[in-house]
């Protein structure tokens, strides 16, 4: 990590570590050395929408998941859902839909486990200001070996589920336009069933860890990078949390519905994106509220806030406890993301158990095809939040337009707000302390951002740092390869 | 008259029919010689050179070179291995082969050869040539990015389908597979059921809407290297 401060009152911190991809933060100070603006820059380049043009539509679920190695399943399934629409598969066979759901819950389990146990637990267990030498996953493994092992095993279980449903742990091919290319064998099912109760127990413990941590540190956390915001998520028609499919809902900071029960194929009527010249990542907002007031949060916190209930018993109990903290109103504490994320892990594990006991997974009716369409839109609740895939396909079966709004992009403005809040509260004078650096990283990490995904990085790009004075003259430039 | 002749391949004496190619004779004896343009049922072509062997010390394409009494053929020496590996690498860098989202992956002979030869990444720089695609046909898709100019489609159309849908045009780096029509593939007499469609060793000519229907684990080369069937046949 490097940091600089210059006379033009601009502080740059990069790279932010323990998030997926690379980020850079700029802080702008006023004459009194107070933070007036924070920018969480996305400096990697995105090109997927361009280079998939001309490719055949059935390639999309496999091609676009290459955006990311952490949650490729989300892109795989969002693209597959869009292509279901293109091939006219309005209702999948039970086997196809349940196999896809199993894949997705496996993905939620592995991604949330990775984030909580490996990336975040060092901050929570050792404190934000702890020595970075011990505040890492190795430190966790030494001091809390049982937690580190649970994290690894839960992730492995999720990855094995992905392999059983998609064919490979990373970048599989299971979901195809109109369905799925395999079912779950009895042998595969029984292997998973043997372990499911142990995994459920660990998920239960993880919820407790996150809840206890939040409650014990509530005074410290409630204002940490927190702010009131709108929350957006898919919810099932009856208002239940549904991570695979649903209707679009946005609520405000008090829980009032801004949009609700929206068929997501009409998303363009409700969501727009703003471009700012300092970031490759766009800033989505709810059209009716405009860019100033229409930005929103997505992901675990938004989902737990936006749903009316969770349809699995243990996760529902956990949700009620979570919501009681804010008396049923949306929880706007940034650090509560971790708790919400663990509630989702428990929900995913409960869902996995239900699915494994469902004989439809052994069915052989895998694909349906209907009337061909020229447009496909697929939304899914990825681990990091609502993911939008939108394609147009010509009569020769080639993709002619693609628009992807990824989860981290939806959280762009909130991450900037969180950084600004933390910096304002923790910066004293013109000096960047280790504590400030840590706090900024902790706030960003709460969102579990995936920058390679949000900008679709092509390889590892060099880091460029440029310094401008107050007249916008370039006074220094450094390149880190 | 005895029409059998004998020759040596990798220190082993085998019998062959007169006029038989080295590749065919070796295969009958359970010896796999890697190949790409060669395909049973099609006339020998000798364009890809993946089947190169050393015949009495000289490099020859075994798919076109007939056997001769007493020749000594090197098929599995380090020198031959390196020649073939370089040829396969060149096929990769001269095209745009993105196995990660190619539907032929797992069933692709070029990819399978790369695995057999332990090629994880080419040692030569990619050329990233500009290639076009032809999606005009209702049921067949041509992606020239993946074409290795093996000519199987040209021969299959002519020899098996009784048509002349495909033909080479251009020379050197400009060489490409063209279609026998005033415009695009849709203007030819090609049908989805033609042998020329299914015979492509890579993903250059594919049937539309098949995509990734075959799951990982059930693809041709998911479990055994290419050529295993030939090698097993003799054991």
Image (cartoon, rainbow, N blue to C red):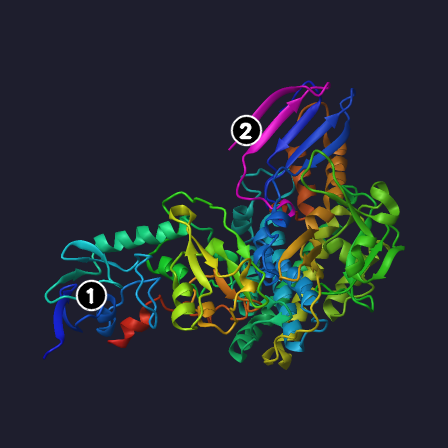
Q: With respect to residue B214, does A230 lie above or below?
A: above
Element type where label 2 sits in the image: strand
x%, y% of residue A301? 75, 54
Depicted A17 relative to depicted A465: above or below: below
Residue A457 shows in the view: yes
Does A38 sit left or right of A239 as displayed? left
In the image, taking residue A46 as reference, residue B144 lies left or right, namely left
Is any atom of residue A68 visible in this view?
no
Front in this rendered view, residue B2 or A337: B2
Q: Give the SS element for disc 1.
A: loop
- Distance, label 2 to label 1, CA atoms, is 60 Å
According to the picture, the residue beneath numbered tag 1 turns out to be B66
Q: Residues within 10 Å of mark 1 (few under 14, many from 20)?
A: some
Q: Is residue A459 magenta?
A: yes
* Screen quadrant of the N terminus of chain A: top right
Question: What's the residue at 59%, 80% (across, down)?
Answer: A362
Determine the residue positioned at 65% across, 67% down: A349
Q: Position of residue A185 (x, y in %)?
A: 54, 78
The segment highlighted magenta reads: A453-481
Q: A187 or B179: nearer the eye?
A: B179
Query: According to the image, label 2 marks what residue?
Result: A479
Image quadrant assignment for residue A322 = bottom right
- Is residue A1 part of the magenta span, yes or no? no
- Pointer 1 indicates a residue of which chain? B
Percent from the top left, x then y, of residue A214? 73, 51
Q: Is residue A96 above or below residue A284?
A: below
Q: Residue furthest front?
A: B182
């Amino acid at each position: 990590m490097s940091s600089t401060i210059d006379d033009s009152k601009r502080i740059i911190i990069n790279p932010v570590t323990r998030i997926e991809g690379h980020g850079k933060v700029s802080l702008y100070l006023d004459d009194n050395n107070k933070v007036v603006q924070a920018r969480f820059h996305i400096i990697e380049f995105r090109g997927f929408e361009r280079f998939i043009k001309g490719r055949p539509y059935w390639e999309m679920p496999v091609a676009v998941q290459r955006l990311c190695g952490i949650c490729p399943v989300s892109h795989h399934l969002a693209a597959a859902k869009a292509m279901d629409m293109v091939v006219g598969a309005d209702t999948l066979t039970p086997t196809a839909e349940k196999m896809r759901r199993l894949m997705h819950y496996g993905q939620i389990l592995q991604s949330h486990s990775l984030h909580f146990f490996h990336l975040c637990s060092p901050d929570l267990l050792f404190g934000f200001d702890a020595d970075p030498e011990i505040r890492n996953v190795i430190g966790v493994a030494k001091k809390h070996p049982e937690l580190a092992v649970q994290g690894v095993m839960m992730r492995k279980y999720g990855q094995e589920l992905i392999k059983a449903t998609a064919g490979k742990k990373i970048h599989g091919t299971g979901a195809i336009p109109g369905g799925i290319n395999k079912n779950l064998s009895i042998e595969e099912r029984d292997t998973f069933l043997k372990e499911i109760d142990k995994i459920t127990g660990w998920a239960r413990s993880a919820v407790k860890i996150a809840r206890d941590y939040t409650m014990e540190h509530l005074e410290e956390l409630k204002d940490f990078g927190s702010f009131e915001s709108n929350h957006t998520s898919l919810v099932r028609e009856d208002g239940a949390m549904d991570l695979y499919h649903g209707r679009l809902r946005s609520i405000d900071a008090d829980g009032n519905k801004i949009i609700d029960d929206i068929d997501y194929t009409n998303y363009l009527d409700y969501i727009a994106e703003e471009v700012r010249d300092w970031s490759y990542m766009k800033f989505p907002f709810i059209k009716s509220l405009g860019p100033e007031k229409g930005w929103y949060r997505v992901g675990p916190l938004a989902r737990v806030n936006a749903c009316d209930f969770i349809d699995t018993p243990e996760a529902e109990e956990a949700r009620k406890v979570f919501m009681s903290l804010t008396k049923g109103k949306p929880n706007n504490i940034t650090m509560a993301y971790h708790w919400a994320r663990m509630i989702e892990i428990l929900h995913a594990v409960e869902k996995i158990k239900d699915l494994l006991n469902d004989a439809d997974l052994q069915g052989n009716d895998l694909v349906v095809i209907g009337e061909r369409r020229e447009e496909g839109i697929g939304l899914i609740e990825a681990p990091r939040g609502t993911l939008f895939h939108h394609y147009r396909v010509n009569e020769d079966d080639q993709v002619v337009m693609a628009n992807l709004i990824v989860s981290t992009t939806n959280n762009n403005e909130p991450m900037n707000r969180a950084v600004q809040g933390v910096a304002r509260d923790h910066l004293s004078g013109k000096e960047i302390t280790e504590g400030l650096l840590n706090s900024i990283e902790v706030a960003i990490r709460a969102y579990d951002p995936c920058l390679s995904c949000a900008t679709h990085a092509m390889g590892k790009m060099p880091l460029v740092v440029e310094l401008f004075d107050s007249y916008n003259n370039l006074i220094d430039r450094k390149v880190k390869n | 008259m005895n029409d059998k002749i004998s020759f040596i391949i990798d220190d082993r004496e085998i019998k062959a029919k007169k006029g038989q190619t080295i590749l065919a004779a070796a295969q009958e004896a359970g010896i796999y010689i890697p190949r790409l343009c060669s395909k049973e049922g099609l006339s020998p072509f000798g364009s890809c050179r993946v089947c190169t062997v050393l015949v009495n010390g000289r490099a020859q394409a075994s798919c076109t070179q007939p056997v001769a009494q007493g020749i000594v053929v090197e098929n599995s020496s380090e020198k031959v291995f390196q020649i073939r590996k370089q040829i396969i690498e060149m096929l990769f860098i001269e095209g745009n082969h993105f196995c990660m989202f190619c539907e032929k992956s797992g069933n692709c002979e070029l990819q399978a050869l790369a695995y057999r030869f332990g090629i994880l990444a080419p040692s030569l720089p990619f050329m990233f040539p500009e290639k076009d695609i032809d999606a005009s046909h209702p049921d067949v898709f041509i992606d020239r990015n993946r074409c290795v100019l093996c000519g199987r489609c040209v021969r299959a159309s002519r020899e098996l389908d009784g048509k002349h849908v495909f033909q080479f045009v251009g020379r050197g780096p400009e060489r490409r597979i063209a279609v026998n029509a005033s415009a695009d593939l849709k203007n030819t007499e090609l049908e989805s059921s033609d042998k020329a469609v299914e015979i492509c060793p890579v993903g250059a000519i594919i049937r539309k809407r098949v995509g990734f229907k075959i799951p990982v684990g059930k693809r041709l080369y998911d479990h055994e290297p290419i050529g295993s069937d030939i090698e097993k046949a003799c054991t």
